[in-house]
């Protein structure tokens, strides 16, 4: 996301801290009035800020935008991903997976997974949608078995972090029609999968019988 001019950051910062602000209250010190008016106009044109009576406030898109901003810098910052990962087991104990065709971890086996979308009204709905989109299976329900926070580090710094909502179900292999890119795999074949897949595979043996688990895991890239 493009870095904003400091005047725009200042205006957004003021409106992050109060519901309404007057024109003069949002102007940074020692800033020319023409420059200030121009950048306020940019935010209004982008429909992030609106004028109500004689005061200014954030629009609904503006509220969504500032929700992504750092409260210290008023700049967008990288946030952890929220995803669902779905473990589907058949009557032979095999698990459904596919080979990743894009980075990160291209070429690694992975359970069906995907990011939550803004239009998903629940985490379970997101999981059911991802199952349909990634495997072709239309399921009536899934069991939310736990959550797993996965952090990937490089040179002692976190480069990727994801909160995975883990879902599980069993199906009869002959009762489902799979998309061409997904297949049934033995557990041993998935042991060299991506970080989240490897961790969830381990949790299957340790904690899937618990009421619901929470797990934190980090893996260093070499």
Image (spheres, grey):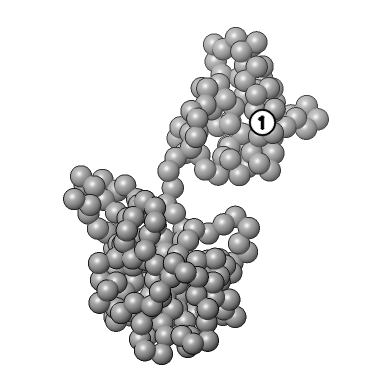
Residue 9 x/y as whole percent: 53, 27
**Residue at far right of view:** 53
Vertical relation: 57 (above or below) 220: above
Vertical relation: 55 (above or below) 185: above
Tell me the quarter of the picture where residue 209 sits: bottom left
Vertical relation: 173 (above or below) 64: below
Q: Residue at x 44, y 40 (%)?
A: 77
Residue 147 x/y as whole percent: 41, 69
Q: Residues within 10 Å of mark 1 (few under 14, many from 20)?
A: few
Tell me the quarter of the picture where residue 100 sits: bottom left
Vertical relation: 175 (above or below) 38: below
- Tell which of 50 and 221 is nearer to you: 221
Residue 106 x/y as whole percent: 34, 55
- Tell which of 197 and 148 is nearer to you: 197
Q: Is residue 27 visible?
A: yes
90 vs 57, left or right, is left
Which residue was labeled with disc 1? Answer: 46
220 vs 48, left or right, is left
- Tell which of 1 and 38 is nearer to you: 1
């Amino acid at each position: 996301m493009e870095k904003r001019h400091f005047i725009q950051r200042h205006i957004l910062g003021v409106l992050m801290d109060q519901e309404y602000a007057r024109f003069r209250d949002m102007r940074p010190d020692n800033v020319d009035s023409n420059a200030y008016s121009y950048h306020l106009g940019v935010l209004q044109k982008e429909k992030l800020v609106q004028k109500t009576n004689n005061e200014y406030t954030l629009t609904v898109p503006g509220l969504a935008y500032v929700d992504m901003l750092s409260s210290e810098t008023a700049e967008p910052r990288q946030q952890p991903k929220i995803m669902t990962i779905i473990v589907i087991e058949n009557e032979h104990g095999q698990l459904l997976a596919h080979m990743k065709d894009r980075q990160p971890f291209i070429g690694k086996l992975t359970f069906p997974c995907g990011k939550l979308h803004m239009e998903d009204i629940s985490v379970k709905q997101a999981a059911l949608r991802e199952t349909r989109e990634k495997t072709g299976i239309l399921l009536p329900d899934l069991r939310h078995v736990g959550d797993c926070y996965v952090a990937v580090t490089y040179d002692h710094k976190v480069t990727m972090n994801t909160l995975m909502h883990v879902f599980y179900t069993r199906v009869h292999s002959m009762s489902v029609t799979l998309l061409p890119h997904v297949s049934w795999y033995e557990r041993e074949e998935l042991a060299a999968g991506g970080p989240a897949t490897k961790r969830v595979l381990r949790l299957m043996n340790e904690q899937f019988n618990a009421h619901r688990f929470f797990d934190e895991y980090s893996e260093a890239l070499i």
